[in-house]
Amino acid sequence: MASAANVSHKAILPVAGRPMIARVIDALAANPRIGRIVISIETPGILTSLELDHAVDFLPPAAGPSASVMEALRTLGTPLLVTTADHALLRPEWIDAFLDSVDAQCDMAAAVAMEADIARDVPGTKRTMIRLADGAFSGCNLFLFRTPASIGVVQLWQRIEQERKRPLRMARLLGIGTLLRYVTGGLTRAALCARVGSLSQASVKLVALPDGRAAVDVDKPADLILVESLLRPPSE
């Protein structure tokens, strides 16, 4: 995506005339519940020339997404809201809907959009779906690490990443019973969260956002076309 647009980093890809990451920062800054905005990027200099409208800080990334989140947790503490630079459609009200759905017993939460809502709000789009017994959903690149216990979820994430090329070891890690329930269509969201919680020693929740557009990020050219069409004023 970056090469096609002749830019050094995907984060600064122009989306409807504005750098993609600037749109994410705008949405975060527009929500009064968000305090300090910190960007994990290896070359902060590429952003200083963008003349961003909001103050941001920088954190050097680690080797991969999970390690970078771990570094952010250790440096910034909790609660920590995490999103991605390619979440160009992010809206302040989605953040509110997400945070309002996380109760005081939850250590870590991830936002998802249900298949029916995606089909309603962005018909025709192709998103990666996880199909469970109580409905299919797609991730929304929005995560809340609410308490220090959530570090256990990141540690589990790192272990899964380490075993991603060894399917049998990954299966043992997640549990054969859980995988069988998934393959046979019997695994629910609650059961999945319970298993992740058991492995990470944390309370985990999947939060379904009401707007299917929250599942759209900019991963491929078709996504860019879709996002720009969604950002275009109705009169155009």
Image: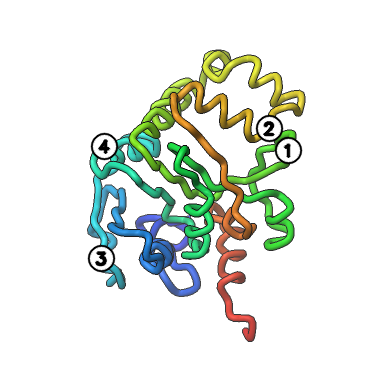
Residue ID for mark 1: 134
Q: Position of residue 81 (x, y in %)?
A: 39, 49
Distance between mark 4 and mark 1 Cα atoms: 35 Å
Q: Which mark is residue 55?
A: 3
Counting from the top left corner in percent of width and height, residue 17 is at 45, 74
Check if mark 3's residue and mark 4's residue have beta carbons within 8 Å: no
For residue 175, above or below residue 235: above
Q: Report whether residue 12 is seen.
A: no
Instruction: Give the crowd class for mark 2: few <14, some 14-19, many >=20 residues within 10 Å.
Output: some
Label disc, if present, on residue 74 of the rendered structure: 4
Task: Tell me, yes or no, whether the two marked residues, 2 and 1, touch with CB atoms within 8 Å.
Answer: yes
Residue lying farthest to the front in this orientation: 104
126 sits left or right of 66 in the view? right
Q: CA distance from mark 3 to mark 2?
A: 41 Å
Residue 188's disc number: 2
**Is residue 11 at all visible to an observer of this figure?**
yes
Query: Separation of disc 2 and disc 4 at Cα?
Result: 32 Å
Q: Nearer the viewer, residue 99 or 90?
A: 99
Mark 4, other Cα within 10 Å: few <14 / some 14–19 / many ≥20: few
Q: Earlier in the sequence, mark 3 or mark 4?
A: 3
